[in-house]
Image: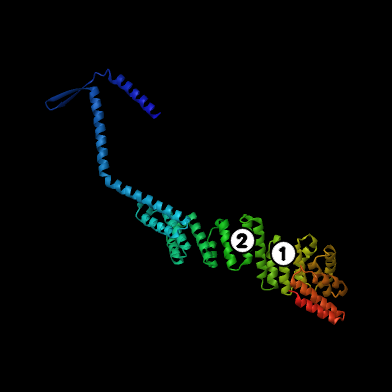
Amino acid sequence: MRGIIWLVLLFVVAVVAATTLGRNDGLVSIYFGAWRTDLSLNLFVILVLASCAVLMVAARSVNRLLSLPERAHEWRQLRRERAAHAGLREALAEYFAARYSRAHRAALRALVLQDETDALKGDGEFRALVHLLAAASLHRMQDRTRRDETMRQLARLPRAVTTVRPVDEGARLLAAEWAIDDRDAPRAIEQLAELPAGVARRTQALRLRLLAQRLTLQPLPALQTARLLAKHQAFSPSAAQSLLRTLAGESLDAAPDADALRRVWSQLDPADRRDATLAARAATRAAAFGSTEDARAWLRPFWDRLAELEPDERQRVALALLDAVPGLPSEWLPRLEAASLALPNDPAVAVATGTAMIERQLWGKARRPLEQAAAAGSLAAPARRRAWRSLAQLARQEGDEVRAQQCERAAASVD
């Protein structure tokens, strides 16, 4: 297509030249001293145009000859710039290929080439990226001393470079990740605290914060972070539920006294307080502190719908109530009897009911559920021992010392 256009233009020029110059009878006379030269106007125009073309070509040739050293310098600089970028790409490829020593050497070559290249000397972002890649390679090689020195060099770069958002955010996230790998959770939290609010809510930042909080034994803040991650769908539903339950349990276990336990329980999410497993764990912890009233209050919503719980949850709730029996008020008796009627073959419910009847001195109602629990091989050993000891107490109340001793021996033999 281009050839056709040029051919058409050539025909147009030929037609214009023939039309304009074909009938031109003009004459140009040139006088030089005693000499006179006559030229046709057409020839004169052609000579002028040819002379201009020759002068232009000569001027361009002289200019190119005089600018040859400058162009040679630019060519060398371009080669160095390309080599520097190639070094950065090589370092990145070697890093991803897990050849960290080669990646570090390639990054250093890129830095040397940058210092020798005028076009890259002012490119602070290039230098910062090379520093980050070199530091990451040193971290993988467990060379913490040189890694930290490389990061200090990055921090000494002009603020116009380090305040570029991607560079600064990436550097802080990497520094936090490396601090966690070094088991230095306070430094990781310090790096994460300096992130902007929007960056701190990113999934990777929340993951790092969760790891740091777990390292520093802060289960309650870790629980809040894990809940944010769950909202971001960073875990599968089952993994999120397991993690949240674990962290909530650790928060309850970390409470040093009953007052702290109440504060932790009130700070839990309503969804956590509706978890029967967590409620049983909190009640057991409260009973250990002697706060059996709180334990029973936390178990009451689950005990009222005990038959609706899963078997594992039902057993946990029943055994948690077993620890909270001391001081049991009479208002609990209808609940216990209703649970016994609804779940007549559940040994955990039986041992909790029987122990509660012993606590209320209802000796006649206590025998059958306690015997059922003591004979249940599926019941946990501590609960079975508790059932045998309650039967021994019942036998002594009835004056049957022989039976009481038999029950004591049976409790001792449970393993």
Q: Is residue 73 left or right of residue 90?
A: left
213 and 201: which is toward the camera = 213
Residue 160 can be seen, yes or no? no
Residue located at (47% from left, 63% from top):
139
**In terms of image quadrants, where is residue 24?**
top left
Give residue 371's position: percent from left, percent from top.
83, 72
Instruction: Point out the image quarter for the C terminus.
Output: bottom right
**In terms of image quadrants, where is residue 409?**
bottom right
Type of the residue with mark 2: Thr
Residue located at (58% from left, 60% from top):
207
Q: Which mark is residue 225?
A: 2
Residue 207 can be seen, yes or no? yes
Indicate the secondary structure of the residue bearing disc 1: helix
331 and 108: which is toward the camera = 108
Residue located at (70% from left, 66% from top):
265
180 and 392: which is toward the camera = 392
Q: Which mark is residue 277?
A: 1
In contact (CB < 8 Å): disc 1 and disc 2: no
Type of the residue with mark 1: Thr
**In terms of image quadrants, where is residue 314?**
bottom right
How many marks do you count on the picture?
2
Give residue 129's position: percent from left, percent from top.
45, 56
